[in-house]
Image (spheres, rainbow, N blue to C red):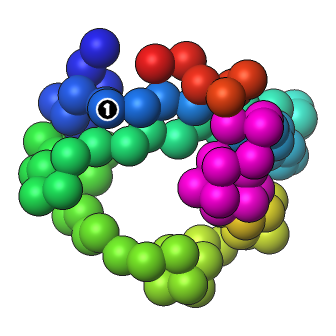
C-alpha cells in the first residue's frame, strides 16, 4: 500500500472520529473520516503541488499547528486509542 506521499505505511488505522465542517462556498456540511499511518523512522515524503513543505514533530507541536478544534480532537484520539494501545487500536487497524 502506498500513500499519495509515496510512503509505504507499516501500520494504518481508522481513528474513531469524523471531522465535520461547514463549507460556505457550497453551502454544505463535510464529514471527513480520520486515518493514521505509521511509517519507518527517517522516511521522507514526496510532496505534490498541494504541499510546500513537511515536518515531523511531536504531538504537542502538532496540536499547536492545527487550526481547528476537530483536528486537535482527532490528534488526541489518535494518541489515546492507537498510540497508547487501547483495544480499539486492534479493531481499527486496516494494515
Residue segment shown in magenta: 77-89
Relative depth, front residue between 3 and 90:
90
Kindly tell me whether residue 28 is visible in this rendering: yes
Residue 75 position, x and y percent, is 65, 61
Chief secondary structure of the magenta span? helix
Q: Is residue 95 left or right of residue 67?
A: left
- Quarter-wise, where is residue 56 in the image? bottom left
Residue 1 position, x and y percent, is 29, 14
Q: Measured along the vertical axis of the image, is residue 37 above or below residue 67?
A: above
- Quarter-wise, where is residue 14 in the image? top right
Residue under numbered circle 1: 10
- Image point 78% across, 38% down: which residue? 87
Residue 9 position, x and y percent, is 31, 31
- Image point 68% across, 37% down: which residue? 89
| Total numbered circles | 1
- Image point 59% across, 25% down: which residue? 93
Q: Measured along the vertical axis of the image, is residue 84 above or below residue 59?
A: above
Please say whether residue 78 is one of the residues in the magenta stretch.
Answer: yes
Amino acid at each position: 500500500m502506498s500513500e499519495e506521499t509515496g510512503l509505504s505505511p507499516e501500520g494504518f488505522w481508522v481513528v474513531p472520529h469524523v471531522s465535520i465542517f461547514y463549507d460556505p462556498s457550497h453551502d454544505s456540511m463535510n464529514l471527513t473520516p480520520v486515518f493514521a499511518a505509521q511509517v519507518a523512522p527517517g522516511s521522507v515524503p514526496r510532496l505534490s503541488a498541494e504541499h510546500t513543505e513537511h515536518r515531523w514533530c511531536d504531538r504537542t507541536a502538532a496540536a499547536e499547528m492545527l487550526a481547528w478544534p476537530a483536528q486537535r480532537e482527532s490528534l488526541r484520539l489518535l494518541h489515546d486509542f492507537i498510540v497508547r494501545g487501547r483495544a480499539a487500536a486492534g479493531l481499527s487497524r486496516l494494515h
